[in-house]
Amino acid sequence: MDMVDTSKDIGKGMLEIYQKFDRIRISGYIQPQFQMAQEKGAKSYVGGDFPEKVDNRFALRRGRVKFEYVHFAEQTGPSVQFVFQFDGTERGVNIRDFWGRIFENRFKLFSFTAGMFARPFGYELNLSSSDRETPERGRMSQILMKTERDLGAMISLDSRKKDHLLKYFKLDAGLFNGQGLAAVGDYDSHKDLIVKASLKPISLSKHLIFSTAVSSLNGGFLQNTKYVYNTKDQNGLKSFVIDSATTNEGKIAPRKYYGADMQLKYKMKAGFVECRAEFITGTQTATHLSSETPTALLTGTDSYYTRKFNGAYFYLLCNVFNVHHQLAVKYDWYDPNTAVSKKEIGKAGTNFNAADIKYSTLGFGYIYYMNANVKLLLWYDMVKNENTALPGYTSDLKDDILTCRLQFRF
């Protein structure tokens, strides 16, 4: 605008347009990839299951465009933020983010967010897919928080003053529908309360940076049938036992998650060495064949199944040569039913099935950051399941996946 004569009408008009749209930021990325599986029809949490006759595929994993607008109140800083993001692939187009945020500018401490946005739980769930070093989030994150986002409202305490006493502390608390984007819409009146308290990155020394957080989700959904199964030990035999009391109908089926995460970065000449870890445990109510939150209320004689679960992941990231080259190792597990294991699953009369099997994944790969706009990822996931007494799961499945991905970003 330095080259425009704003003393004339046409210049004034251009200045008004510039001032209005200078606050809009457009960004996006696409992730074309090629994958190979150990066998045709492999079940996978790395981009979805392979079709029955397919063991290799090209796919556009994500194609996202994000529009962000920030309005600055005169002499007080940002007052309103608006974000819209959609995802387009060969499978169709879907909305991913659609939310607005109001900033409080007297104390520069609070903000209020409403709309469709990522649940404030844990670390991996809120790490953008464009920044994440692995192809996908872990199995646990995908099952418990499918699509990551939900409709709701959240208040945040996060100081925007550099010298504030709470400058390293952040607190998020929100109410959400609970079903996320996996369901067509909200199917009951109960809401999930999610709270996350974070210690933002803080320098422990000249080379060491540390951050951590704790999260909780207290929620559930309407139990519109009287049939509920829980894992119990009866005379040394663990099994799902039904509770069909008429008082069960109308109660809230529990979904309670508790998590903690930490990140530790060490700065060296070539870049960084970073360790990450996150652990989540709690209670999940789902169905007999899946530990995912149901996308609709059950009806008739259908039954709910309540399970105790836990899971975790561990990252080790290291730059080699310089910041353009990075090696990564990740180990994660998800145990959907901690009350049973191995040969207890599939035993006659127990009613346990594939939804109760523990999985662990060891992944490793190489990331080449060509420049600020292009990234190459080569990644191999070694997936292990428990050996059970359940037909089809008596030994480890052949479901290892190799992923080769390019990311273009603007």
Image (cartoon, rainbow, N blue to C red):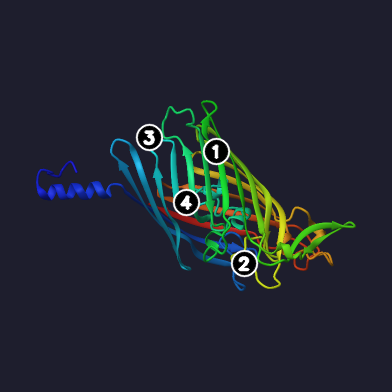
Residues under numbered marks 4 and 3 in contact, where contact means CB atoms less than 8 Å apart: no
- C-alpha gap between disc 4 and disc 2: 34 Å
Residue position marked by numbered label 4 in the rendering: 130
- C-alpha gap between disc 2 and disc 3: 45 Å
Residue position marked by numbered label 2 in the rendering: 297
Comparing marks 3 and 1, which lies closer to the viewer? 3
- C-alpha gap between disc 3 and disc 1: 23 Å
> Where on the picture, by quarter, is residue 408?
bottom left
Q: Which mark is residue 198?
A: 1
Among numbered discs 1 and 4, the one appearing first in the sequence: 4
On screen, residue 389 above or below 200: below
- Residue at the (89%, 56%) spot, across then down: 236
Residues under numbered marks 4 and 2 in contact, where contact means CB atoms less than 8 Å apart: no
- C-alpha gap between disc 2 and disc 1: 34 Å
Report helix, strand or loop for mark 3. loop
Q: Percent position (x, y) of residue 318?
A: 56, 40
> Is there any visible trace of residue 237 in the rendered image?
yes
Among numbered discs 3 and 1, the one appearing first in the sequence: 3
- C-alpha gap between disc 4 and disc 3: 34 Å
Among numbered discs 4 and 3, the one appearing first in the sequence: 3
Comparing marks 2 and 1, which lies closer to the viewer? 2
- Residue furthest to the left: 8
